[in-house]
Amino acid sequence: ARDFCTQCLPYIDVLFGIEPYHLWKDEEDHAKGDVKDGVPLQPDFEQQDAVFQAFVKQYPNLKCIARHVRYAYSGSENSLKAYMWYEGKTYESGTLTFNILDRVGAGDAFAGGLLYGMMNGYEPEKMLNFAVASSAIKHTIRGDANLIDNPETIWGLVDMGFDKNFDIKR
């Protein structure tokens, strides 16, 4: 799958995630490894920025690259934050910590939140924070879809502030 996904990179504008793609240090000699080799699953800003810069150098067609980073403390408590390269700059969201009801669909909710922000002209930082909040809220909903249809609900979570825990009251 990684080989096929990598072949698609010259034809896309927005890239979600970085793992299913090869990013060879040397296209002629793959034995030299992948740019992502040695970069942890939970990179710091500089590590993530270097990977994004390597992607856009090799694939200048990319307009946006985004990925979320999960911190798993237990099977029921996680934190999320995200990184995004957009219009020549790398951004980092705040971190949300939450209890999990259902993880399925949370990545799709992140992608949907980011696309919603793009389509509605959000500034990059707001776009990224909205996407993280969309994903975090999805973790509190059973099933594989984020059923929140009011963006003000998601903005409410963003407005509560990042870098702290939140609980959903039912």
Image (spheres, rainbow, N blue to C red):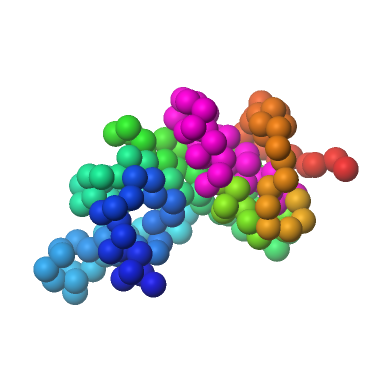
**Residue at horizontal 57 percent and vertical 52 percent from the top:** 108
Snapshot quadrant of residue 19? bottom left
Query: Which stretch did the figure color magenta?
Result: 111-140
Task: Give the residue at the far left of this rendering.
Answer: 28
Q: Nearer the viewer, residue 147 or 46?
A: 147
The percent position of residue 51, horizontal first and vertical second, equals 31, 51
**Residue at horizontal 43 percent and vertical 45 percent from the top:** 66
**Residue at horizontal 47 percent and vertical 25 percent from the top:** 121
Please tell me whether residue 130 belongs to the stretch shown in magenta: yes
Snapshot quadrant of residue 27? bottom left
Q: Nearer the viewer, residue 151 or 85?
A: 151
- Quick check: 161 left or right of 65? right
The percent position of residue 112, horizontal first and vertical second, equals 56, 44
Q: How many marks?
A: 0
Residue 118 visible in the snapshot: yes
SS majority, magenta: helix
Locate the N terminus and report the quarter of the image it occupies.
bottom left
